[in-house]
Image (spheres, grey):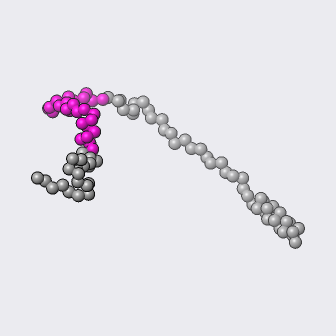
Amino acid sequence: MRKLALIVLAGAFALSACNSKPPEEPQTTNNMMEVPEEEIPANEAETPVEVPNNSAPAVAPPVVSQDQQTLDDADATGLTARLPDDSVGVPTNQTRQTD
């Protein structure tokens, strides 16, 4: 049985090899076209036009210390904690009564 399968397989390979054509080489085409020098446009740049600057000069930002900047950023993002004074003795989960 194995010999028969081997013979059939060898015959199939032989028949497939007989019908194959050699691979065709793709023809290389040159699509490049030479442009005559008369048709190449000159690279002439236009003269730049001066645009008047009517804006006011920029004002320098105020000088802020690093600690103050950190506190301002924390306050703006809600990262500051407002805890009651220790002298009152009120737990943090209750509100203080104002005098």
Q: Quadrant of residue 4?
A: bottom right
Let me know if residue 68 is in the magenta part: yes
The x and y percentages for residue 71 are 25, 40
Above or below 71: residue 43: above
Magenta stretch secondary structure, dominant: loop
Give the residue at x 24% y 49%: 83
In the picture, measured across the screen, residue 1 lies left or right of residue 43, that is right
The x and y percentages for residue 14 are 81, 61
Visible residue check, residue 51: no
The x and y percentages for residue 75 are 24, 45
Q: Quadrant of the N terminus?
A: bottom right
Let me know if residue 80 is in the magenta part: no
Give the residue at x 87% y 69%: 2
Question: Which portion, as a residue range, is magenta?
Answer: 45-74
Visible residue check, residue 42: yes
Q: How many numbered marks, from 0 up?
A: 0
Q: Quadrant of residue 37?
A: top left
Give the residue at x 83% y 63%: 10
Give the residue at x 27% y 44%: 74
| Front position in the image: 97 or 11 | 97
In the picture, measured across the screen, residue 38 lies left or right of residue 25, that is left
| Front position in the image: 92 or 34 | 92
The x and y percentages for residue 56 are 14, 31
In the picture, measured across the screen, residue 33 lies left or right of residue 84, that is right
| Front position in the image: 10 or 18 | 10
| Residue at the farthest bottom position | 1
